[in-house]
Amino acid sequence: MSTPITWASPAQPENNVPRLQRLLWDVFSVNETRVREAPDRVVEFRGQITQPSQQVHTSISDRFRDLGYTALLFRDNNVDVIQAIQGVVKPAPTQLWINALLLLATIVTTLMAGARIAGVNVSLEVFARQPELLLRGAPFGLTLMLILGVHEMGHYIAGRVHNAAVTLPYFIPVPPFGAIPLGTLGAFIQLRSPIENRRALFDIGLAGPIAGLIIAVAAYVYGLSIAEPIRGAYTLGRSIFTQFLIGVIQPQTLQSGWALKTNPFMLAGWFGLFVTVINLLPVGQLDGGHILYAVAGRRAARVGLLTIGALLVMGYALGSTTWLLWGFLGLFFGVRHAPPLDDLTPLDPIRKLIAIGALILFVLIFVPIPFG
């Protein structure tokens, strides 16, 4: 029996549609073929996979690539779909000097931020005359850079393990003279090729927060251990996890009227923990959004909207401009997530358990009122 083909126009020239369909003979039972973009730019085969989904996608990816196509595998209304898109991603070489320049600039601005925390009168004129004053910012600046760098290298290494084309980190320097006193807006890596499947998406998304969190916790614990108890109130918000650490390391400061005098390591560790919270928000293109999509697929957008709603409500109820801001940023950047090439292969049981652990971790380090 011949397979029905839905063409975009009545007559088409000779094209690759039959050749693409023949390549599926041993992995996919085709019930219908649709040309989404004529003559053969986007072709969709609908039917049923006849082998495990990961094996199917690996096979067809190699075969389609030889014809100059990229293969997508997903499910639509309980029907398995293979989509062939003309073109193959071939990332151009990156300009490493840009990464190096941004790294050096961010080291300088975070050192300036650390010097400001250490009591130096921060201005470009002061540092131009006495550049050695930057060294007073080393405990904070280098600790924060280590946390951010390890976070991004976690993404990078996981990406390379899964054969994704990823760049080295791009750091974002900001002079610490205004509303952003840290000297940086963080860092990011750029994905220059589509993610292979949900398992790769999960690993790449989670590797960064976990790697950075280890360094942030170490810095915060060390900062707590050398912090001086003082009379006053805490100015940095506490999570369940930080409250526990304070109770173990400095229990006397949990009494009313006592606090801890912050130090560079404690501050850098706290901000590292807070950055991890932000990244784990299950919204859009944040790390938490990657993890959520890997677990829930296209249902992730609904969870993202609920998360944004919760941030806005909580920010209003608690008077937290931080969460109000992130709620609006979530709306601005959107909650939709691009699917991986293989959107059919689910997470394995171990990764599902790790995802539950990541959710528990997020709850433990979440800070309802970050500042004040």
Image: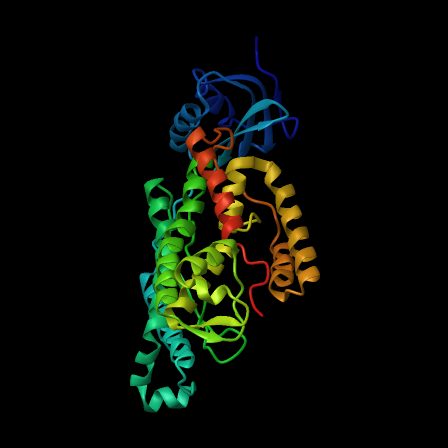
Q: Quadrant of the N terminus?
A: top right
Judge left or right: residue 39 versus residue 24: right
Q: Is the image coloured rainbow, by chain, by secondary structure, or in one colour?
A: rainbow
Residue drawn at point x = 45 percent, y = 16 percent: 25
Q: Residue at x 66, y 46 (%)?
A: 306
Q: Closer to the camera, 44 or 290?
A: 290
Q: Is residue 328 visible?
A: yes
Which image quarter: residue 264? bottom left
Q: Is residue 330 above or below residue 200?
A: below
Q: Position of residue 163 (x, y in %)?
A: 35, 41
Residue 238 in percent (x, y) is at: 52, 61
What residue sits 37% from the left and 45% below the top? 159
- Residue in the picture at 44% in, 61% down: 246
Q: Position of residue 278 (x, y in %)?
A: 52, 56
Count of numbered circles on the image: 0
Foreground residue, 258 or 143?
258
State which quarter of the image contains the C terminus: bottom right
Residue 311, compared with residue 204, is above or below; it is below
Q: Nearer the viewer, residue 58 or 62?
A: 58
Q: Is residue 348 visible?
A: no
Residue 360: x, y in percent?
A: 50, 44
Query: Farthest residue in the top direction?
Result: 1
Reply above or below: 371 against 151: below
